[in-house]
Image: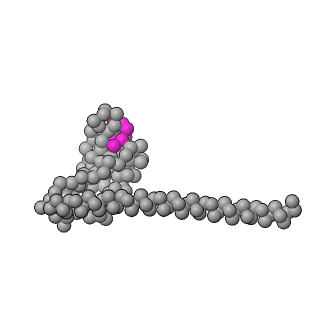
Amino acid sequence: MTRKTVGRVSFAFAVLLIVATVACASREDKDVNRAKAAEIAEDNEALRQLRSAGSDLAKPHKVEFYVVVPSEASADAAADAIRPLGYTVTVSAGEDDAHWLCVSSRTMLPTIEEITVARSLFKGMALKYRGAYGGWNTAIEH
C-alpha cells in the first residue's frame, strides 16, 4: 500500500471508531435516560397512591429511604456520610444477618423533585458502599 492509501485507511478507521463510540455512548445515554424515566414514573405512582389514600402532599412528611449494604462497617460509613446532609440515620442488621440496613429519614415535602434528588443520593451511597437502594416510604399525613 502506498502512504496515501494507508493514510486514507487510517482516517477511515478513525472515523469508524468515532462513529461506533458515539453510537455506543448514545445507546448508553438512552438506557440511562430510560432507567431514570422508569424511576420517576415509579416515584410518581407512589405519590399518586399516597394522594389517593388521603395524604396531603402539601404538608411535610417524614420520609424514610433504605440502603442495604454488605457489612456493618459499610453501613456505619454510609450513615456517617448521610447524617451531615440533614438526615437521621439508623443502622441495623438485616433480616438475613448477611446484610446491613441504613434507614435515613427526613421531614420534607414529598414532591417528585425532592424524591428524585434523594433517590439519586441514596443510589449513589448504595453504589459507593457496594449495596443496593431499597426505596422509600412515608406515612399518610392528613
The image position of residue 26, as x and y in percent, is 54, 63
Quadrant of the image containing the C terminus: bottom left
- Would you say 17 lies left or right of 99 here? right
Occupied quadrant, residue 129: top left
Residue at left 39%, top 62%? 37
The image position of residue 89, as x and y in percent, is 26, 47
Occupied quadrant, residue 109: bottom left
Q: Residue furthest toward the left?
A: 142
The image position of residue 33, as x and y in percent, is 44, 62
Residue 54 in view of the camera: yes
Does the magenta run of residues contain 69? yes
Say if 125 sits above or below 57 in the image: above
- Would you say 10 lies left or right of 38 here? right
Residue at left 35%, top 52%? 122
Say if 74 sits above or below 12 in the image: above
Identify the magenta region. Answer: 68-76
